[in-house]
Image (cartoon, rainbow, N blue to C red):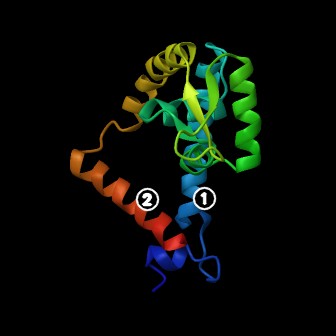
Amino acid sequence: MADDPRALGDPGSESFRVDSYPFYLLNRAVSRYNVIIEAQLRAIEIDIPTWRVLMVLGEESPRSIGQLSKTAVIHLSTMMRIIERMMKAGLVERAPDAQDGRVTNVILTDLGREKLAAARKLTAPLYRQVITGFSQNEFTRLLEMLNRLHANLG
């Protein structure tokens, strides 16, 4: 059992090893990625939370603030502050939902689309670098496993 990486990654195990703990490895990768991306995004005067919102809205705009919060994995109160900042910068607008006036939608502006295009151009080379050496099957499997980890937390 000691050779089973699941046991080595179990914080309750006497044989626990941090380098076998999946959440340490995930955080390590995300932290490193964010350090690099943050420096790149600074060149176009946006931060990581703004970039995340732009990426989500680039997929579908408008979106409700609640949908944005969930999809971008940002607490609702924090999302409200990010949206305010983005509105002041002219990247997004807010409008009531046509079907439910209680819901506020966030809409990407033309300037927001320009910033999104610039951010995608800046971040694409790092993405390509990060997935180097992964076959299509390996990458598909990685996505499946990450989604399974997420589902298991539900």
Picture layout, residue 29 above or below residue 148: above
- Residue 59 picture location, percent across and down: 42, 34
The residue drawn where x is 56% and y is 37% is 33
Q: Quadrant of the N terminus?
A: bottom left
User: Circle 2 sits on which residue?
Assistant: 146
- Which kind of residue does numbered mark 2 sit on? Leu
Picture layout, residue 132 above or below residue 7: above
Residue 19 seen in this snapshot: no
Residue 102 seen in this snapshot: yes
Q: Residues within 10 Å of mark 1 (few under 14, many from 20)?
A: few
The residue drawn where x is 61% and y is 13% is 44
The residue drawn where x is 34% and y is 59% is 144
Marks 1/2 in contact by CB < 8 Å: the verdict is: no
Residue sitting nearer the eye, 4 or 146: 146
Residue sitting nearer the eye, 56 or 131: 56
Residue sitting nearer the eye, 90 or 139: 90
**For residue 85, side relative to residue 61 (left or right):** right
Picture layout, residue 8 above or below residue 124: below
The kind of secondary structure element at disc 1 is helix
- Residue 17 picture location, percent across and down: 59, 69
User: Circle 1 sits on which residue?
Assistant: 24
The kind of secondary structure element at disc 2 is helix
Picture layout, residue 55 above or below residue 27: above
The residue drawn where x is 28% and y is 52% is 140
- Which kind of residue does numbered mark 1 sit on? Tyr
Decide which of tag 1 and tag 2 comes sooner along the chain. 1
